[in-house]
Image (cartoon, rainbow, N blue to C red):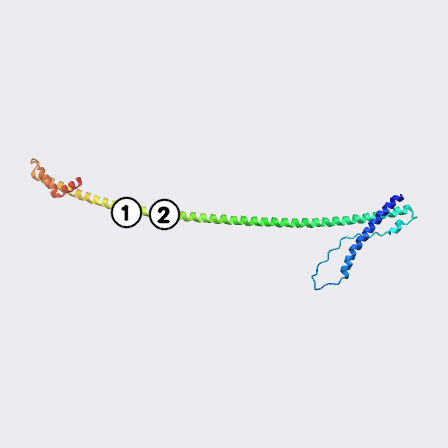
Amino acid sequence: MDAFLNVVEAELARLIQENTDLRNQVESPAEQQLTAPVDTAGDLRPVAPVGPVMAPLPPPLRELTSPGGDHNVRAARVLGLAQEMADRVTGEAKAEADGMLSSAHTTSEQLLSKARAKAEDMVTEARTRAETMLTDARSKAETLEQQSRDKAAALERDAARKHTETIAALSQEQGILEKTIDELRTFERDYRTRLTAYLDSQLRELDERGSAAPTDPTHTQQGLVSSGFGTHTDAGSR
C-alpha cells in the first residue's frame, strides 16, 4: 500500500512541478512585456494570446509526503487530489470541446451562408438568362410577324394591281368587241335595207314586164350592182 501511494505521490509531484514550470514560463514573458517600455514611434502590433495554463494544485506536496502520516488520510488526500486534477482536466477538455464545437458551428454557418449566396447567385443568373432568352424570342416573333404582315401586304397589293390590269384589259377588249358588234349591226341594217330595196325594184320590174317575158341574167346582175347589194355580197364572199 505504501509503495502504491509513493508511486502516486511521485507522479502527482511530477505533474505539479511540470504545471509550476509551465506557469513560470508563460508568466515570465508576459511580465516582461508589461514592464518593458512602449515604443510609440514603432508599429503597434497585437500581442499574441497567452495559451491556457493549468491552475496549481492546492494541496501542498509536503503534507502528502510527510512521514508518519496515517495511510488512510494519505490515501484520501491522494484520491482527492487525483479527483480534483481529473475534474480540471475534464473541465479543460470540455472547454476545448465547446470551443471546437463553437468553431464548427461558426464554420458550418459560414459554409451555409456561402452556399446560400452561391445558390442565390445561380438563381439570379438563371433568371436573367431566362429573361434574356424570353426577350430574344419575343423580338424574333415580332420580327417574323412584321415580315409576314409586310409580305401579305405586298402580295395583296400585287394581286390588286394584277386585278386592275386584268379588268382594264378586259374592258378594252369589251370596248373593241362592242364596237365590232355595232359595226356588224350597222352593216346588217344597211344590208337589209339594200336587199329590201333591191327586191322591191325587182318585183316592180316583174310587174311591169309581165309574167311571160323571160328575165335577163345580165340585167339582174346589173341591177344588183346598181343597188349596191352585189358589191357588199362580193366583198363578203371575198
Q: Is residue 39 above or below residue 81?
A: below
Location of the C terminus (image quadrant) = top left
Nearest the viewer among 218 and 61 is: 61
The residue identified by callout 2 is: 158
For the point 89% across and 49% down, the residue is 65
Q: Quadrant of residue 25?
A: bottom right
For the point 36% across and 47% down, the residue is 158
Viewer-nearest of discs 2 and 1: 2
Q: Amino acid at mark 1?
A: Gln
Nearest the viewer among 191 and 17 is: 17
Q: Earlier in the sequence, mark 2 or mark 1?
A: 2
Residue 218 x, y percent position in the rendering: 9, 38
Q: Is label 2 in a helix, a strand or a loop?
A: helix
Q: Is label 1 in a helix, a strand or a loop?
A: helix
Could you tell whether 68 is left or right of 22 in the image?
right
The residue identified by callout 1 is: 172
Q: Amino acid at mark 2?
A: Asp
Location of the N terminus (image quadrant) = top right
Could you tell whether 237 is left or right of 158 in the image?
left
